[in-house]
Amino acid sequence: MGRESEHLSDESRHRQRDDGDLARRTRATRGRYDRIARFYDLMERGAESGRLAAWRSRLWAQVKGSRLLEIGVGTGKNIPYYPSAVEVTAVDVSSGMLQRARARARALGNEVDLRLMDAQHLEFADDSFDTVVATCVFCSVPDPVLGLQELRRVAKPDGQILLLEHVRPEGALGTLADLANPLVVRMMGANINRRTVENVRQAGLVITGVEPLWRDIFKLIVARPGKA
Ligand SMILES: C[S@@+](CC[C@H](N)C(=O)[O-])C[C@H]1O[C@@H](n2cnc3c(N)ncnc32)[C@H](O)[C@@H]1O
């Protein structure tokens, strides 16, 4: 052990361990999505041709302002819904997913500023965006509260945050989701037992609406940053 680390306080030692663990979990998430990127659209085809497309339209109809940020753009399934004449920046932690989003934007002739970036450490100034959107993302961000705090930071004080997320169901199904979760994460990258509405609150966002879309599982969450 070097002199410097010998003198580290317990608190900074814990922080280093936590940072190391988060970095490891983030690398694992990126690896999973890099691996499934080329199958992702195929895996999601059923859901997309079903209700998901309608839910996306519903969310994008609520977008306001001229500077938008999409978190976890994935293969770019929201790109066809982007309003015209707005400036959209979209980020993802997986270069494999981002590569597909780039191809989709090109095919649609849509100009999108696509960047490789971790939602837990956004490289944007405070108060930058009118609307921040994420669809089916906070099920896989390793530290969802940290990520949601970053959304709050980069949203303008009078801006909004729109989330389409699946969450942990109540009752026996919830227990089943807890049991199945480790396997699902390994195969699909997503946690099926996240309490995202609670996480949004914990991040300091002010929820203005939670619309149930399917059972108590899929929800459209509308929030404002709740800062002065
Ligand atoms: C289930 S996919 C959803 C993709 C897209 N939003 C959609 O609706 O089809 C989850 C996406 O979140 C991305 N993601 C997970 N953790 C992330 C993080 N920490 N920062 C940015 N993106 C992340 C994954 O790489 C993946 O592309």
Image: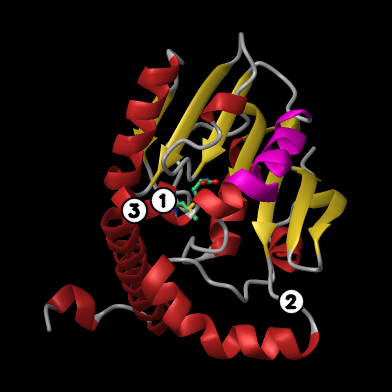
Residue picked out by circle 1? 42
Task: Looking at this view, name the residue that lies furthest to the top.
Answer: 85
Look at 46% across and 16% down and name the residue there.
110
Q: Main secondary structure of the magenta part?
A: helix
Question: Mark 2 or 3 closer to N-term?
Answer: 3
Which residue is at the front of the view, 2 or 48?
Answer: 48
Q: Given the image, on which type of amino acid does mark 2 rest?
A: Pro
- Residues marked 3 and 1 touching at CB (< 8 Å): yes
User: In the image, what residue occupies the spot 75% across and 23% down?
Assistant: 64
- Secondary-structure class at tag 1: helix
Q: Residue at x 28, y 44 (%)?
A: 95
Q: What stretch of residues is rendered in magenta?
A: 49-61
Q: Which quarter of the rendering shows the N terminus? A: bottom left
The kind of residue tagged 3 is Phe
Residue 174 lies left or right of residue 102; in this view the side is right
Label 2: few (<14), some or many (≥20) within 10 Å?
many
- Looking at the rendered structure, which numbered label has been put on residue 227? none
Q: Which mark is residue 169?
A: 2
- Horizontal arrangement in the rendering, residue 148 relative to residue 141 (left or right): right
Per the model, the C-alpha gap separating discs 3 and 1 is 5 Å
Which of the 4 image quadrants contains residue 70?
top right
In the picture shown, does residue 194 fall above or below 65?
below
How many marks are shown on the rendered structure?
3
Specify whether 37 is left or right of 82.
left
Any mark on residue 39, and which? 3
Query: At numbered mark 2, what does the secondary structure look like: helix, strand or loop?
Result: loop
Circle 1: residue type: Leu
Question: Is disc 1's CB within 8 Å of ligand 1?
Answer: no
Placement of the C terminus among the 4 image quadrants: top right
